[in-house]
Amino acid sequence: MLSQKTIEIVKSTVPVLKERGIEITTVFYKNMLGENPEIKDMFDSGKQKDGSQPKALAMTVLAAAQNIDNLAVLMPAVQSIAKTHINVKVTKEQYPIVGKYLLGAIKEVLGADATDDVINAWAEAYGVIADVFISVEEKMYQEQGK
């Protein structure tokens, strides 16, 4: 469970996510895929080139920030995204990699505005969000007998 302070900090980032979210996720993908070429095939290169994948992730991050105190609202989207993750064989071990690069992109794009409080709150929130995805995906893998 997230602290009230974490919830407030994450929600306070909503305006900047609306304004610079796509920039953050573009940097995220560039850095993550550039430094981890072994996972490049898990991503649709066409959606990377046309910007639709960074935009979709930016909208997901924004929705998570807006609803960080009620993540149940996001379950239909989580279910849909989890199906895609299952199709490309995402594992729970990959979530820390994503978290590292997402937080790094926030720092890189926001610079001094990415205070320790903001990064720590997002790290905590990401952990909770990742756990939701991992739980849903583990259930899907079990249902597939994998």
Image (spheres, helix red, strand yellow):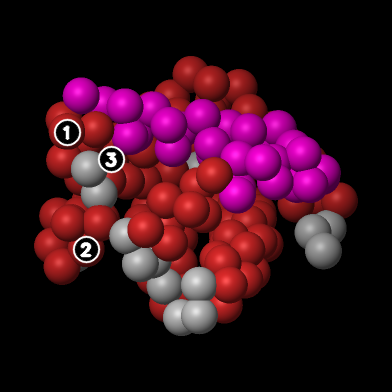
Q: Amino acid at mark 1?
A: Gly
| Circle number at residue 46 | 1
* Mark 2 surroundings within 10 Å by alpha-carbon count, few (fewer than 14), some (14 through 19), many (20 or more): some
Residue position for label 3: 27
Mark 1 vs mark 3, CA separation in Å: 17 Å
| Residue positioned 32% across, 60% down in the render | 88
Asked whether residue 116 appears in the rendered view, the answer is no
Q: Secondary structure at mark 2?
A: helix
Q: Quadrant for residue 22, please give it.
A: top left
| Residue positioned 17% across, 33% down in the render | 46
Q: Is residue 118 above or below residue 136?
A: above
Q: Nearer the viewer, residue 143 or 28?
A: 143
Q: Is residue 95 above or below residue 85?
A: below
| Residue positioned 33% across, 34% down in the render | 53
Labels 3 and 2 touching (C-beta < 8 A):
no
Residue position for label 2: 39
Q: Secondary structure at mark 3?
A: helix
Q: Amino acid at mark 3?
A: Val
Residue 55 x, y percent position in the rendering: 39, 28
Q: As drawn, is 9 to the left or to the right of 138?
A: right
Residue 12 x, y percent position in the rendering: 70, 32
Residue lying furthest top in this view?
19
Residue 137 x, y percent position in the rendering: 55, 66
Residue lying furthest right in this view?
4
Q: Secondary structure at mark 1?
A: helix
